[in-house]
Amino acid sequence: MIRHADKPVVMILAGHDPSGGAGLVADAEAVRGCGGWPVTVPTAMTVQSTREVASVEPCSGDFIRRAARVLFDDFRIAAIKVGLIPNLDVLEAVIDVARMSPGTPLIVDPVIRSGGGAELSTPGLLEPIRHRLFPLVDILTPNRHELARLTSLTEVDDVSRVVEVMSLGCAAVLVTGTDPLDDESTTGNVVHTLHTPELNRQWQWPRLPAHYHGSGCTLASALATRLAAGEGLATACAQAQRFTWDTLDNGLALGQGQYLPDRVWRAPDFDATLE
Amino acid sequence: MIRHADKPVVMILAGHDPSGGAGLVADAEAVRGCGGWPVTVPTAMTVQSTREVASVEPCSGDFIRRAARVLFDDFRIAAIKVGLIPNLDVLEAVIDVARMSPGTPLIVDPVIRSGGGAELSTPGLLEPIRHRLFPLVDILTPNRHELARLTSLTEVDDVSRVVEVMSLGCAAVLVTGTDPLDDESTTGNVVHTLHTPELNRQWQWPRLPAHYHGSGCTLASALATRLAAGEGLATACAQAQRFTWDTLDNGLALGQGQYLPDRVWRAPDFDATLE
């Protein structure tokens, strides 16, 4: 039985995380878990564990352009999801890739620091991201720390920051509220908020008891897949949050550090009599 | 609910294929589909589609060693699966990685040519693979073309070739028989054969009607996962073949070329009322 083109194809541009918690493999799993097919272009190699990022080794912009061009010629790409952008060479390639397929939804997860606190991009990259990438973005998915880093220092609350990001060209922003800013407590539910020119929506989720490696990647890739499947923006945001929360609630403690989201939790269906 | 260490962790050393049909992402999917958790170290980047391999760009041996060392320190690795080895620098790193964890089952899929016929490794690599890697291999999973390439020209049948490979140090060999050699027809069932010093086993599978991108990767990674889960060699070979056949029987025609194995066929379970 060959099944023809019944899965939306999502292009992933992301760093590779060997632990599988985050990055390109995690994105691919999230796309599969949400009913799509991932095609994946690495933006960087990393050496990392569930505890820390030891190094980030950027891929070349030239490689990224060539890999993406071949994929556009082969597949019908229904959404593009961007994760780690380690330097200006890669940023320029990502912009070129987005322009190869105008009209395809562009979902950008602005990965700036690892969960463990390591800086993942070269200094000076935030300004070209703001002024050259944001005008192409259909939805940005920052956490509150990333939102604060991506906006000017004069903005003092999340809503003002979102207004600034949208004034730079992002069509919509989904702000995840798992982690508090410095002066806040972590009690109560987690609140995620969607902002578009037409609507603002808010969702609340029970706070989970652990720290996870790759929750942001999972959410953005799930969102990209549901948009690729044709869902409306608010529904896709809701479904992606539900999916992500479930992957965290089923998180796995396989390494020494952060827990790993379980994005493909189908139990294997082996025939015990087969040998 | 945090689930502790209930999944065997498999280390994948493989080339990255952006199409997702083969390579590192395919291996990761197969590990998940068979009940394990993959940690993945790229051996090469490639530019490719479901039709052809446009380029192979090796990773550095130094990167591979560092990435693997961090993973061994973080996870309990229960099996190591090796795919594409593009050059001597990577081969030496793969040998060093295998020696970092003596006693861990080492499954080697000797990827030499792509399904489309492109050579994927540098010339001259077969001899050091035979003499330096084979002595470390617990099970080699060549197709019949690869088996012929990996043995001396004087061997004229598969059994003689297997004997030669085992005399070089491979503890076991699973030969996949999907593709005929030059002078043979493609009628009848597909026959895969397992050879060890103690036993020989043979399995027959109904021939499927298409060409697939990544069937060998899927089989070797499924086998690694079942060995990591503690299954005996013959049972693990049988379960891996069953899994692989199912992924091909559910193959997807999403690109212009070869079909894509569906290794994660859990239907997404979305709540249509959520928005």
Image (tube, coloured by chain):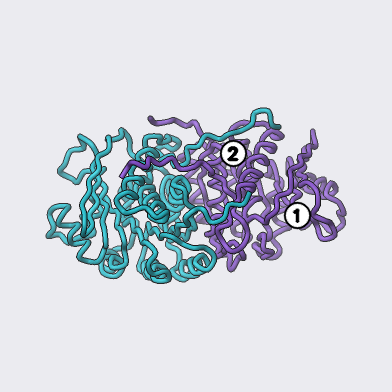
Chain colours: A purple, B cyan
Q: Position of residue B266 (x, y in %)?
A: 50, 37
Secondary structure of residue under mark 2 = helix
Q: Which is nearer the eye, B134 or B37?
A: B37
* Residue under the point 69% across and 64% down: A117
Look at the picture and state if B167 lies above or below A105.
Answer: below
Q: Is residue A35 visible?
A: yes
- Amino acid, disc 1: Asp
Q: The C terminus of chain B is located in which quarter?
A: top right
Q: CA distance from mark 2 to mark 1?
A: 25 Å
- Amino acid, disc 2: Thr
User: In the image, which is nearer the foreground, mark 2 or mark 1?
Assistant: 1
Which chain does tag 2 point to? A
Taking the image as shown, residue B84 lies to the left or right of residue A67, namely left
Q: Position of residue B254 (x, y in %)?
A: 45, 36
Residue corresponding to mark 1: A179
Residue corresponding to mark 2: A225
Taking the image as shown, residue B197 lies to the left or right of residue B84, namely left
Which chain does tag 1 point to? A
